[in-house]
Image (cartoon, helix red, strand yellow):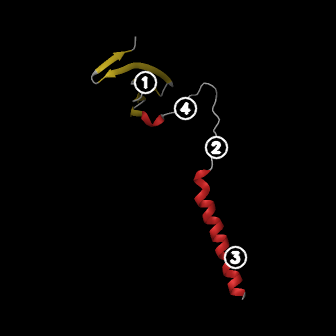
Amino acid sequence: MKVDFYSKIILTFIAIFLGVIALKPLRPLPVSAAAPGIVGPAKFWQIQFSADGGLVTFFDQGTGELWRLNTGSTQFTYLGRVEAMGKFNKAR
């Protein structure tokens, strides 16, 4: 008698937890807040960099912009933009 009651309770808990797991995708996703002026998440995955001594060069694949950082003076320099393969517009 006690074994039967115990089995029913355990099976009931298993059924409840499986129901929670099954219904979890149906709930709405939480809304995340963003600062004003930010359209979407930052896409740092498309930035490549190369370091050589005290210079670090950054290339943004999304915009084609090329930047250089001098680590000694911590100053960024805009080098230009890659418009197409082999076509580079230098900054003036």
The residue that label 4 is drawn on is 40
**Could you tell me the amino acid type at mark 2?**
Pro
* Residue on which disc 2 sits: 30
Is disc 3 surrounded by few (<14), some (14 to 19) or many (20+) residues within 10 Å?
few
User: How many marks overall?
Assistant: 4
**Secondary element type, mark 1:** strand
Residue at image point 60% right, 65% down = 18
Residue 83: percent from left, percent from top: 34, 20
- Farthest-out residue, left: 86
In space, the residues marked 4 and 2 are separated at their CA atoms by 16 Å
Q: Nearer the viewer, residue 40 or 76?
A: 40
Task: Give the foreground label among 4 and 1.
Answer: 4
Residue 25: x %, y % from top left: 58, 52
Give the structural element (helix, strand or loop) at label 3.
Answer: helix
Q: Amino acid at mark 3?
A: Ile
Figure quadrant of residue 36: top right
Q: Relative to 38, does residue 87 appear above or below in the rendering?
A: above
Under circle 4, the secondary element is loop
The image's mark for residue 9 is 3
**Distance from label 3 to label 2 (Cα)?**
33 Å
Sequence-wise, the earlier of marks 4 and 2 is: 2
Q: CA distance from mark 1 to mark 3?
A: 65 Å
Say which label, 3 or 2, has the lower sequence index.
3
Residue count near mark 4 (Cα–Cα under 10 Å), binned few <14, some 14–19, many ≥20: few
Q: Mark 1–mark 3 contact, CB under 8 Å? A: no
Is 71 positioned to the left or the right of 81 in the image?
right
Which image quadrant is residue 61 in? top left
Residue at numbered disc 1: 67
